[in-house]
Image: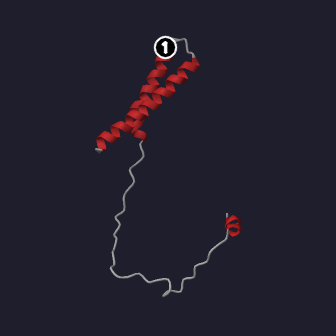
Amino acid sequence: MDALLLALVVYSAQVLAVVSVAAVASLFSREVIPSMRLTYWYCVSAVCVALPLFAPAPAQMQPVSVAFVSGTAPSHADSNVTVSSFGLSTAALLI
């Protein structure tokens, strides 16, 4: 997906959420004065216009290098690694 299209989809979803919450809040407030209702919706539209200002800064990606080595891995018999097994009661104690 193109970055601009993705930003538009995210912005549209944010506007939908803000307007939905504002509409539900408007229903519960039951404001009867039309000028107050108009001022309320002006403030809601101002919040919707200001939504891109509240966007977090994009995370900076750090370059990573990977090196592949060909060869054989050491077996467990060659190394000094000990493998221990736990029973069910020991696992219950660890949790």
Q: Is residue 41 found left or right of 7 in the rendered image?
A: right
Counting from the top left corner in percent of width and height, residue 33 is at 53, 11
Residue placed most toward the observer, 66 or 31: 66
The secondary element bearing badge 1 is classed as helix
* Residue 41 versus residue 55 in the image, above or below: above
Quadrant housing residue 89 = bottom right
Q: Is residue 9 found left or right of 27 in the rendered image?
A: left
Counting from the top left corner in percent of width and height, residue 88 is at 68, 67
Residue placed most toward the observer, 41 or 81: 81
For the image, the number of numbered tags is 1
Looking at numbered disc 1 in the image, what kind of residue is underneath it?
Ser
Q: Quadrant of the C terminus?
A: bottom right
The residue at 58%/19% (across/down) is 29
Counting from the top left corner in percent of width and height, residue 81 is at 54, 83
Quadrant housing residue 86 = bottom right
Label 1 sits on residue: 35
* Residue 8 versus residue 76 in the image, above or below: above
Q: Quadrant of the N terminus?
A: top left
The residue at 47%/30% (across/down) is 18
Counting from the top left corner in percent of width and height, residue 8 is at 33, 37
